Amino acid sequence: LRQRLARGETLPGFGHHLYPEGDVRAALLLEMLPRQGPAAALAAEVMALTGLAPSVDFALVALRRHLQLPAGSAFGLFALGRCAGWLAQALEQRATRQIIRPRAAYTGPRPAGLARN
């Protein structure tokens, strides 16, 4: 860890631009793992060295390893969680008879070749 940090490299699985104080999803998943296990030790070491908390990606990989699931399963766990959220939104929209319309506007540069309306 120290060598990677000394070279200015980032540590995948730590820090998240949307959750600068820590990702609550990661915290909840990591609570399911042994407190003295390798994931907890690594997370504590990185936090001590960088102040960065584990992301949901780190937590899902740690959970996958603890459960001895096949390599690549962490992505499947992430997708499963995302699908559950989408289904919950669909059920909510159906129950309230209102479509959820998130408000967002792209503010980046116009892609080359895109015509103006």
Image (cartoon, helix red, strand yellow):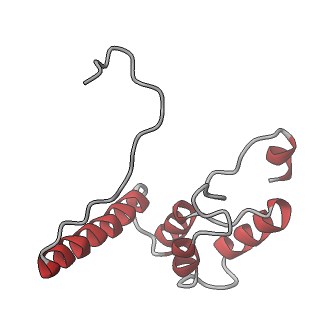
From the viewer's perspective, tell me whether residue 23 is left or right of residue 103: right
Question: Compared to 78, does 28 lie above or below?
Answer: below
Give residue 92's quadrant in the image.
bottom left
Give me the residue at 39% from left, 22% from top.
111
Of residues 78 and 113, which is closer to you in this image?
A: 113
What x and y, as percent, mark residue 63? 50, 72
How many marks overall? 0
Residue most extreme to the front: 117
Q: Quadrant of the C terminus?
A: top left
Question: Compared to 50, does 36 lie above or below?
Answer: below
Of residues 107 and 83, which is closer to you in this image?
A: 107
What x and y, as percent, mark residue 50? 81, 59
Residue most extreme to the top: 113
Give me the residue at 49% from left, 67% from top.
60
What x and y, as percent, mark residue 66? 52, 74
What x and y, as percent, mark residue 38? 67, 72
Of residues 29 and 113, which is closer to you in this image?
A: 113
Give me the residue at 18% from left, 66% from top.
99
Give residue 113's quadrant in the image.
top left
From the viewer's perspective, tell me whether residue 71 is left or right of residue 30: left
Give me the residue at 73% from left, 62% from top.
52
